[in-house]
Image (cartoon, helix red, strand yellow):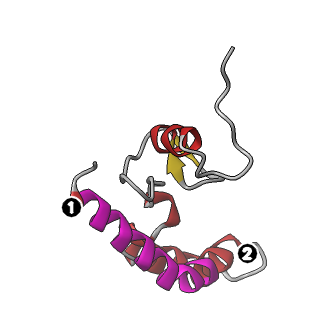
């Protein structure tokens, strides 16, 4: 089980990234717009730099929904490899069978 603090910190990051995403996207598009005035583009860059770092979607870490483990993450199941194996062995994941030979 991952530390509760790291799981909560990641949840706060995800919440902040979702809340600020429209503003960030608008500023990014303005900063990249070649037709806009250079002063406007520069101002958009400065505003973008003033946004909190944790409001960026790339700061959010994929974590297992059961254990909070950040490594070995399967996006399809939103679980770590260990949790997937345990649930598959128990027959909890429909259509998945643990191979044996």
Q: Position of residue 83 (x, y in %)?
A: 47, 44
**Farthest residue, direction right:** 35
Q: Residue at x 50, y 58 (%)?
A: 58
Q: CA distance from mark 2 to mark 1?
A: 40 Å
Q: Earlier in the sequence, mark 2 or mark 1?
A: 1
Give yes or no for residue 8 being in the magenta stretch. yes
Residue placed at 53% from the left, 43% from the top?
A: 90
Is residue 23 among what the camera can see? yes
Q: Quarter-wise, where is residue 99 in the image?
A: top right
Q: Which residue position holds label 1? A: 5
Residue drawn at x 36%, y 52% as measured from the top left: 67
- Residue 89 x %, y %: 55, 38
Nearer-the-camera pick, 79 or 88: 88
Can you identify the residue that label 2 sits on?
A: 33
Which picture quadrant has residue 7? Answer: bottom left
- Side of 58 where 10 appears, left or right: left
Q: Is residue 13 within the magenta segment?
A: yes
Is 42 rendered above or below residue 10?
below
* Mark 1 Cα-neighbour bin, 10 Å: few <14, some 14–19, many ≥20: few
- Up the image or down, 3 lies above or below 45; here it is above
Image quadrant where one finds the C terminus: top right
The boundaries of the magenta stretch are: 5-26
In the picture, residue 40 is in which quadrant? bottom right
In the rendered structure, the answer to whether residue 88 lies left or right of residue 80 reads right
Helix, strand or loop at mark 1: helix
State the image coordinates of residue 21 (x, y, percent, origin top left): 55, 79
In the picture, the disc for residue 63 is: none
Q: Nearer the viewer, mark 2 or mark 1?
A: 1
Q: Residue furthest top?
A: 101
Label count reads 2
Main secondary structure type of the part rendered in magenta: helix
């Amino acid at each position: 089980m991952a530390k509760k603090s790291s799981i909560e910190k990641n949840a706060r990051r995800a919440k902040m990234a979702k809340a600020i995403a429209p503003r960030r996207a608008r500023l990014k598009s303005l900063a990249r717009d070649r037709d806009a005035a250079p002063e406007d583009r520069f101002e958009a860059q400065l505003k973008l730099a003033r946004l909190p770092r944790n409001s960026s979607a790339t700061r959010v870490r994929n974590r297992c929904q059961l254990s909070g483990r950040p490594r070995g993450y399967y996006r399809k199941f939103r679980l770590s490899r260990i949790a997937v194996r345990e649930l598959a062995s128990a027959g909890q994941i429909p259509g998945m069978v643990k191979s044996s030979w």
